[in-house]
């Protein structure tokens, strides 16, 4: 039966379908082609600088983006693990500072207490004087105490690593080594110098205040309450449990390097020993900047910054303030401990977070690409 109106509708449908098929086959603007993933592009850019493996995660209240590139193990095609674990290095300092600030908020100690009050006789000799150094100055890196990190053989060379990768250091032993060196400057809020020793001392003070180890306090105050299932304080245990990429260090620039995945990280208690994941770090930063871990007064203390010329940023208490290319700034921390380098942080209100890590030595180009990734992702808004 002939129905003119229906025929016209059919012709319109066929005509529209033909246009779509033609557009798809010719690649015209009428077709909706897949959009490039900005995070994947940034991760690829980090990988292109020579990093062996790269993984990143970006979160906001309603999104979670993950990207990875490279391999998890040299000489294989094994992908970087999803939500893999790695040593977060100095990003540990933010955990330590959070615990100390919680204790201060509870009235159990003060940021103006001296090191000598809590650790009598520990910081002395060769010009070091714990009675002149406050807890605030430890967390802020304005104490002048020398960094013990460069004195640890396992962190200096392949031979040192092989000789000492299972060695256990006590905090007292580490601080004792630092006391053999004169301070870099007299304690001064106007001078700044990064020192892992400051945070080893902060861990020792935490134990003195609470009667419990630094690891127990970090677990009970941060890791368990936030449900950070991929995060741990390994103590002297040298292995990374769960999915992880191998870590490589001491690269000669020819693609070689020593596998340094196994490490007793007791030389970094309080300063760099935490194992975590990009996802857990994002959750931590969101909770911290979102006000779920610290009362407003303590969060203000943490985010009040001074100039840190060594790092070309401003630094608060265990947290750096980094300018954003789109205006304003974000808070975060770089992390590195033998074979893993991380960079991450959150917007001031904690609503958007970004973490990226690599599993090999990072060239200057690699680290700049990581900084760019975090900057671009924290600046990028969702439609």
Image: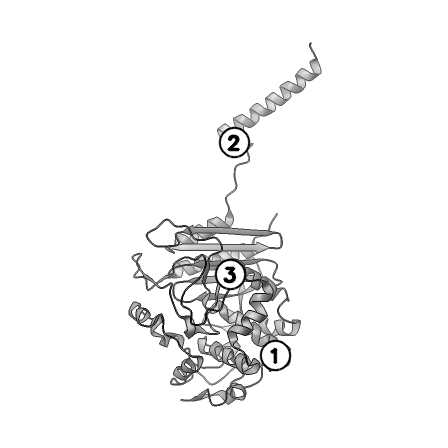
Q: Provide the secondary structure element on which disc 2 rests.
A: loop
Q: Dot 2: within a 10 Å radius of its alpha carbon, few (fewer than 14), some, or many (20 or more) residues?
A: few
Which residue is farthest top? 1
Q: Which mark is residue 229?
A: none
Residue ID for mark 1: 104
Quarter of the picture containing the N terminus is top right
Label 3 or label 1, whichever comes before in sequence order = 1
Question: What's the CA distance linking mark 3 and mark 1?
Answer: 28 Å
Q: Which mark is residue 28?
A: 2
Residue ID for mark 3: 230
- Tell me if residue 316 can be seen: no
Q: Disc 2 or disc 3, which is closer to the eye?
A: 3
Q: Dot 3: within a 10 Å radius of its alpha carbon, few (fewer than 14), some, or many (20 or more) residues?
A: many
Query: Does the residue at mark 1 contact the one at mark 2 (Cβ under 8 Å)?
Result: no
Q: Find residue 218 and report its image quarter.
A: bottom right
| 5, above or below 44, in the image | above
Q: Report whether 139 appears left or right of 178.
A: right
Label 2 or label 3, whichever comes before in sequence order = 2
Q: Residue at x 67, y 17 (%)?
A: 8
Q: Provide the secondary structure element on which disc 3 rests.
A: loop
Q: Residue at x 53, y 86 (%)?
A: 118
Q: Pinpoint residue 337: horizontal percent, then vertical percent.
A: 41, 67
Q: Pinpoint residue 238: horizontal percent, then vertical percent.
A: 40, 67
Judge by depth and name the residue closer to the eye, 110 or 211.
211
Query: Does the residue at mark 3 contact the one at mark 1 (Cβ under 8 Å)?
Result: no
Q: Pinpoint residue 224: horizontal percent, then vertical percent.
A: 57, 66
Q: Disc 3 or disc 1, which is closer to the eye?
A: 3
Q: Provide the secondary structure element on which disc 1 rests.
A: helix
Q: Pinpoint residue 34: horizontal percent, then vertical percent.
A: 52, 39
Q: Dot 1: within a 10 Å radius of its alpha carbon, few (fewer than 14), some, or many (20 or more) residues?
A: some
Label 1 or label 2, whichever comes before in sequence order = 2
Question: What's the CA distance linking mark 2 and mark 3?
Answer: 46 Å
């Amino acid at each position: 039966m002939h129905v003119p109106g229906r025929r016209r509708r059919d012709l319109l449908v066929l005509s529209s379908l033909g246009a779509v098929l033609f557009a798809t086959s010719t690649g015209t603007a009428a077709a909706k082609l897949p959009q490039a993933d900005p995070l994947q592009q940034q991760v690829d850019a980090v990988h292109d600088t020579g990093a062996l493996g790269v993984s990143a995660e970006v979160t906001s209240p309603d999104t979670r983006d993950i990207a990875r590139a490279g391999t998890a193990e040299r000489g294989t095609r094994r992908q970087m693990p999803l939500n893999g674990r790695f040593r977060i290095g100095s990003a540990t300092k933010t955990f330590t500072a959070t615990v100390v600030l919680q204790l201060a908020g509870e009235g159990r100690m003060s940021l103006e207490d001296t090191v000598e009050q809590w650790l009598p006789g520990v910081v002395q000799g060769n010009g070091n004087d714990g009675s002149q150094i406050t807890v605030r100055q430890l967390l802020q890196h304005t104490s002048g105490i020398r960094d013990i990190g460069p004195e640890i053989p396992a962190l200096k060379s392949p031979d040192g690593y092989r000789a000492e990768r299972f060695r256990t250091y006590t905090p007292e032993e580490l601080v004792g080594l630092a006391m053999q060196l004169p301070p870099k400057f007299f304690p001064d809020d106007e001078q700044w110098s990064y020192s892992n020793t400051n945070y080893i001392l902060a861990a020792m003070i935490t134990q003195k205040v609470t009667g419990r180890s630094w690891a127990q306090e970090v677990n009970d105050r941060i890791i368990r309450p936030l449900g950070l299932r991929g995060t741990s304080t390994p103590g002297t245990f040298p292995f990374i449990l769960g999915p992880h990429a191998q870590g490589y260090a001491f690269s000669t620039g020819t693609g070689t390097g020593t596998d340094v995945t196994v490490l007793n990280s007791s030389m970094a208690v309080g300063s760099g020993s935490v194992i975590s994941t990009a996802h857990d770090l994002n959750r931590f930063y969101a909770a911290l900047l979102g006000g779920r871990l610290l009362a407003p007064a303590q969060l203000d203390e943490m985010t009040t910054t001074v100039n840190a010329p060594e790092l070309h940023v401003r630094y608060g208490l265990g947290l750096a303030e980094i300018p954003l290319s789109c205006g304003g700034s974000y808070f975060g921390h770089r992390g590195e401990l033998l074979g893993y380098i991380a960079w991450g942080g959150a917007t001031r209100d904690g609503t958007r977070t970004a973490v990226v890590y690599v599993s090999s030595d990072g060239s200057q180009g690699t680290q700049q690409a990581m900084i760019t990734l975090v900057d671009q992702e924290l600046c990028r808004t969702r439609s």
